[in-house]
Amino acid sequence: MSTHASGLKLRRRQPCAHRAKSTCREFSANYRLFFPSLRSEHPRPNVAQDLEFLGPQEISTPIVPTLLEPMFTTAGIASSSSVAEKDHFESPAAGSPPHGRPAAADFARERIYTIAGLAITVIGAVMLGFDVGPVLVHRIRAGRGWGVLEQAAFIAIVYFFIYGNFVYLLARLGYLSRRLAHREPGRDELEAPFDSDEPPSLTVLVPSYREEKRVVTQTLLSAALMEYPRRRIVLLIDDPPNPDNPAAARQLEETRKIPAEMGRMLRDAARPFQAALADFEARRTRGKVLARTESRRLSILCRQAAQWFEAYAESWVGGDHTDRLFANKILLEPARSLRKRAAEFEAAARSDAEPPSERTLRRGYRRLASLFDVELASFERKRYVNLSHAPNKAMNLNSYIGLMGRSLREVSRADGIHLEDCDSAHADLTVPNTDYIITLDADSLLLADYALKLMHVMEQPGNERVAVAQTPYSAIPGSPILLERVAGATTDLQHIIHQGATRFNGAYWVGANALLRKRALDDIREVSEERGFPIARYIQDRTVIEDTESTVDLIARGWTLYNYPERLAYSATPPDFGSLIIQRRRWANGGLLILPKLLRYMVTGPKRANRLAEGLLRVHYLTSLAVVSFGMLVLLAFPFEGAMRSLWLPLVAIPYFWINGRDLVMNGYGWIDLPRIYALNLLLIPINLGGVAKSLHQAVTGRNTPFGRTPKITGRTAAPRLYVAATIAILAYCACFGAVDLENSRWVHGGLMMLNAGLLWYAMCYMIGLREAAEDLGLLRAREAVRNALESMPLFNASFWRGPEVQELVGTNGVRMTVEMVSSRESVVQPLTPCSAEPLGGRVTGADVGAAAPTEIHPGT
């Protein structure tokens, strides 16, 4: 049965005997993990052979996670077999295929197609000018003022669309060229930091605001399990420190506990590997290193580390698409890598193989010792009066970055707690300085190689002026929700644009994840005053797209940005229309405010050979949402029938849509998603214009727009009534005036209007939902109140309710039931409680919680 984010699904509660049997399976799975020789799935030496090469310290602490801890247990262990062998981790959920991996020959062929598309677009644009230009000249000479305005508006809008087509194809050409030239560095190069006693230091900052514990847990663990020595992770909690709401207080307390509890789990996991490294260093000092014996030890340790990942992955079985990606990419992929490395060390331990060098052995021990060796902490800026309290992500990051390299103490004063500098001996808080910072949104996931690969780029000779290295995030595949899947497809298309822009020095910092050089942030640091206190700003918060404005600040000072040409990060996509509005309205707000700063840089900045391409890409990035949304609205509102009859218009449009469709297929989607994306873009017209209106309001008033955080919560986010009404108004306008156009033989414009009306209706039905739209407009409040009361009942007969939906959801045989709330992020199972409600025609009394019991229906009067 299909469900929406706010839908309900009922299922029978498992009998006690079945639950006991399941618990035994869980114990069996854990027992096998503690004693690997009992596992039939992975043939191993017997226990005595294992213990022969492991000292007592190395086996004294279990290396598997505590699977029964509430914070880390979600769906339970499905079976005693290794999760690595489960098919559903190896293939995506139905309806949303994974990102494709085209071969080099495919990239070369696509490059030819792109060049052809660019040529056709340029030729079509020139020939279109010969069609529409003389008409404009004729109207000017004839003095037809309204006709001149109409033709000029049409030309401006259409040529901006062509400009967008050209930019997309140009960026795609850059992307394909970079992919063809890209050679992934070998493991020996990537793992060089493990050879150094003082590798560059790294701090990961995760800003968080009222996030669900599960979301934060996955993000923090993905960062904690990155491979890199000396990494430090700080959760920047931005919730109000003393909430009045009991639910908010509980959520805050849970969030505060996550770093400490996760740190304890990882320290326990790290202990045997750190002990093994210490023993190896002692043997090396004594000159008693036997390469084949050490290889055997490393092989055993690698397998045990792999078991830790596999054991933890089992606790995410049965979750949603985010859980599947987390288990497969963050947990099972490293496990597979460790098992492969174990096999390599096992092969090196054989007498007929060449023994590994001492450097290779030492790196192997160091890599394992650092695998779980990570410092986790949290920080709350709003606890301190003299730090910024501005409600946005940029100032949350700035507040902590400004404390780096300082020792501070808490001082209580009349107005609250202050943080003041002091010597390290008396410090309540010591914040180490760092060479590099990774900023990571709380709904993003990083792959294990993220830090190693981006650090390798930053540390290359000649890259000293690279301020930001990143991999534009990809959408999490496998969502069962159409809106989330289609919005994710647009994210994956943007990935191509960002990657291609790097080829022409036109990249922007995309704030979901990035590796930042601390020295570059110091270079753009500004100090201002807030509530009488000096506040340092590294990342600009004048607009809500803080990463975009900071990009202009960096390039103006001679720094560059680099997009790594692989997918190394994933971020959640809003699963419903309400949360999508918040995200996309924020994206549309600020570009026009930053444009003057960019134009100053383009005029005064250094002259480069590809300055024209850089300018085209950067200007389009800032202006496209505003101009395209407004232009599309104008094209729908006015019947440019004569101008739209030019045969050159489809010629310039076909290459763009054809290439767009090919990119969707290349990223694992289908051609059917092309019209769906067009329908989504129609939905986004009023949202984008709402963001632009906020930019204009800020430009006039000088007051900053509040930062709208994208909700990352279970359940549906209600959409503002204005945007739902605006969408319905556009749909009605297209349908009505499309019919008028067709009646008056304006076939081209009428056909366009009816096409857009049909796609908008599809989007209303399958992306917003007619029922959800009615709820957001306030049309179903009374009915929803009754439905909510009924859904909280343990037992009832659905025959009094209208429609087949409840009939298939509700059992009438008196068996105890549970309700499962289904969303794109989490499934929460809650036992039903006794209650009574007033349905449409009578009163229903729920049975007591427990075994089978009758349900009474009392007829209404």
Image: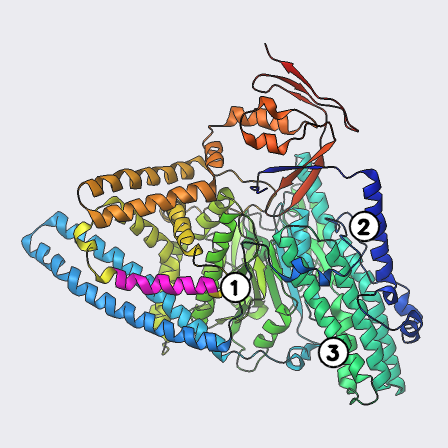
The alpha-carbon separation of the residues under discs 3 and 1 comes to 31 Å
Residue 380 visible in this rendered orientation of the protein: no
Considering every residue shown, the one lying at the far left of the view is: 142
> Where in the figure is residue 24, as x and y percent of width and height?
86, 49
Q: In which quarter of the image is the N terminus?
A: top right
Which secondary structure lies at badge 2? Answer: loop
Q: Is residue 42 shown left or right of residue 228?
A: right
The amino acid type, in three-letter code, at marker 2 is Leu
Task: Name the residue at the top extreme.
Answer: 861
- Which x, y percent locates residue 373? 76, 66
Q: Distance between the residues labelled 2 and 3?
A: 37 Å
- Residue range corresponding to the magenta coloring: 650-665
Residue at the location (32% across, 37% down)?
A: 732
Residue 290's place in the image compared with 142, above or below, is: below
The residue identified by callout 1 is 472
Q: In which quarter of the image is residue 118?
A: bottom left
- Residue 175 x %, y %: 45, 71
Q: Residue 197 carries which label?
A: 3
Q: Does the magenta stretch include residue 659?
A: yes
- Kind of residue at disc 1: Pro
For mark 2, does the 10 Å Cα neighbourhood hold few (<14), some (14 to 19), or many (20 or more) residues?
Answer: few
The C terminus: image quadrant: top right
Q: Nearer the viewer, mark 2 or mark 3?
A: 2
